[in-house]
Amino acid sequence: QVQLVESGGGSVQTGGSLTLSCAVSGSTLTIYSMGWFRQPPAQEREGVAVIYTTDGSTNYADSVKGRFTISHDNAKKTLYLQMNNLKPEDTAMYYCAAGPMGRYYWGQGTQVTVSS
């Protein structure tokens, strides 16, 4: 199993920045990909960004391309999401996830609120 704990959420104004962190522990050698997801109020959860451990390649949702950056520090076993130029529509509960191919373990979430 893989355990994940997010931190770094908070409240910012439009145009501000936040960095989310996700401490990863457990069976980390089995991890194939790691990602960030978010669930805005009264909406479905959506993928934000993913990074693959095999080659470090990344993918982003169109809504965050050019503003968000996903990264992973192997030594610290921590996943990051650098979020710049935040907009009110980025307001959501953010979750990190990681796991072997075909399966994700989830963190408990951290709230990001962007005010206009």
Image: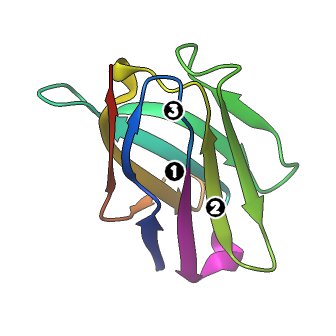
Q: Nearer the viewer, residue 44 or 90?
A: 90
Sooner in the amino-acid sequence: mark 2 or mark 1? 2
Mark 3 falls on what kind of element? strand
Identity of the residue drawn at 53% across and 66% down: 22
Type of amino acid under label 3: Val
Type of amino acid under label 1: Gly
Of all residues, the one furthest to the left in this rendering is: 42
Q: Nearer the viewer, residue 100 or 15?
A: 15
Identity of the residue drawn at 79% across and 72% down: 74
**On the rendered structure, is 4 left or right of 110?**
right
Identity of the residue drawn at 88% across and 49% down: 55
| Quadrant in which residue 11 is drawn | top left
Mark 1 falls on what kind of element? loop
Magenta stretch: give its range: 19-31
The crowding category of the residue bearing disc 2, from other C-alpha atoms within 10 Å (few below 14, some 14 to 19, many at least 20), is many
Per the rendering, the mark at residue 102 is: 1
Instruction: Give the percent coordinates (x, y) of residue 112.
Output: 35, 43
**On the rendered structure, is 68 left or right of 11?**
right
Q: How far apart are the alpha carbons under marks 3 and 2?
A: 13 Å
Question: Is residue 11 located in the magenta-colored stretch of the structure?
Answer: no
In the rendered image, the vertical position of residue 37 relative to residue 89, given as above or below: below
In the rendered image, the vertical position of residue 23 relative to residue 58, given as above or below: below
Instruction: Give the percent coordinates (x, y) of residue 110.
Output: 34, 56
Say which quadrant the C terminus sits in. top left
Instruction: Give the percent coordinates (x, y) of residue 78.
Output: 65, 70
| Quadrant in which residue 91 is drawn | top left
Per the rendering, the mark at residue 79 is: 2
**What residue is pinned by disc 3?**
48
**On the rendered structure, is 51 left or right of 55?**
left
